[in-house]
């Protein structure tokens, strides 16, 4: 893959795109940059329409082989590292995002990443806060504050270009073995934490989402390892076991 030797199987994920021209353009970009796979979550347009095919050109195979998912959680099921693009200026203060350059340089600090996914949101309003929290890191492409939103295919092209550019930099650092907890593992863990804390009365239904999001964002920013998230999940399982068995006494 021309994008970088430290990772393979790059997946571009589009969430609910509604323009076939954009989808076709992204398919062409996947061919330009030798992306492994195009995935689409709940498309709002016909991805095999004539307009999409006209824009795809040599990227036609990415349309033909595109994988469709009903939700974003399923679309990232096999990804070790997930990055999400955000151009919104009303982003929650509880979310933390970095420049695309910093994030892509960060990916170069690992020896090898097996499955890397980059998520792009809807043309009109991007990704929701909950969807952004499915990513290990959130990045933005610096643009004018007066008009921060980029066309979908333009955002994909800039991200892929910057990712390729970062792969050519020689960073003077010792490469680490990639051992971050996958975003899916973190998501599944926090589903269990949410249920447990509701059960013991620490959280209330109407405020649980906000509180869990803050905690989840902290775990993501801490670059939590797979071992650490497994320890956390083990604690949750043990507490649930105690709660279930204490009822029988």
Image (tube, grey):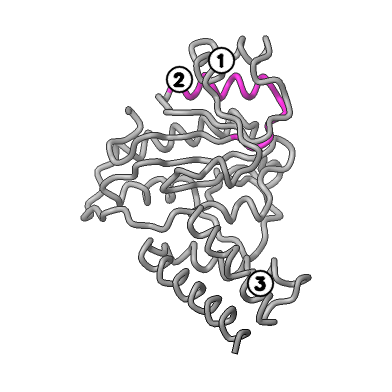
Q: Quadrant of the N terminus?
A: top left
Question: Which contiguous range is marked in magenta?
Answer: 14-32
Badge 3 density bin: few <14, some 14–19, many ≥20, Cα 10 Å? few
Residue positioned 51% across, 74% down in the render = 236
Location of residue 166 by image quarter: top left
Badge 2 density bin: few <14, some 14–19, many ≥20, Cα 10 Å? some
> Would you name the residue on which mark 2 appears?
31
As rendered, which of 7 and 138 lies closer to the eye?
Answer: 7
Residue 169, position as x, y percentages in the image: 29, 41
What whole-number distance in Å separates the C-alpha atoms at marks 3 and 2? 41 Å
Q: Residue furthest right?
A: 206
Residue 186, position as x, y percentages in the image: 50, 60
Badge 1 density bin: few <14, some 14–19, many ≥20, Cα 10 Å? many
What whole-number distance in Å separates the C-alpha atoms at marks 3 and 1? 43 Å
Q: Residue furthest front?
A: 248
Question: Which label lies toward us, 3 or 2?
Answer: 3
Q: Earlier in the sequence, mark 3 or mark 2?
A: 2
Apparent side of residue 219 relative to residue 5 in the rendered image (left or right): right
* Kind of element beneath mark 3: helix
* Kind of element beneath mark 2: helix
Dominant SS of magenta comes to helix
Apparent side of residue 183 relative to residue 148 in the rendered image (left or right): left
As rendered, which of 249 and 211 lies closer to the eye?
Answer: 249
Q: Is residue 14 above or below residue 172?
A: above
**Circle number at residue 211:** 3
Location of residue 39 by image quarter: top right
What whole-number distance in Å separates the C-alpha atoms at marks 2 and 1? 9 Å
> Is residue 197 within the magenta segment?
no
> Would you name the residue on which mark 1 appears?
56
Q: Quadrant of the C terminus?
A: bottom right
């Amino acid at each position: 893959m021309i994008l970088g030797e430290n990772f393979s199987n790059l997946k571009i994920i589009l969430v609910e795109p509604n323009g076939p021209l954009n989808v076709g353009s992204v398919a062409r970009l996947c061919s330009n940059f030798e992306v492994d796979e195009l995935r689409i979550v709940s498309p709002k347009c016909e991805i095999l329409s004539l307009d999409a095919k006209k824009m795809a050109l040599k990227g036609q195979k990415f349309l033909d082989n595109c994988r469709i998912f009903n939700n974003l959680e399923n679309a990232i099921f096999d990804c070790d590292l997930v990055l999400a693009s955000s151009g919104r200026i009303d982003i929650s203060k509880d979310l933390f995002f970095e420049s695309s350059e910093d994030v892509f340089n960060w990916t170069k600090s690992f020896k090898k990443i097996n499955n890397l996914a980059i998520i792009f949101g809807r043309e009109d309003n991007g990704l929701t806060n909950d969807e952004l929290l499915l990513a290990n890191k959130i990045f933005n492409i610096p643009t004018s504050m007066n008009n921060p939103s980029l066309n979908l295919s333009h955002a994909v092209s800039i991200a892929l270009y910057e990712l390729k550019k970062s792969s050519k930099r020689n960073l003077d650092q010792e490469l680490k073995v990639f051992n971050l907890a996958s975003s899916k593992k973190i998501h599944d863990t926090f589903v269990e934490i949410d249920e447990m804390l509701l059960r013991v009365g620490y959280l209330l239904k109407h405020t649980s989402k906000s509180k869990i999001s803050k905690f989840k964002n902290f775990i993501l920013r801490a670059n939590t390892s797979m071992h650490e998230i497994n320890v956390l999940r083990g604690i949750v399982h043990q507490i649930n076991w105690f709660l279930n068995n204490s009822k029988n006494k």
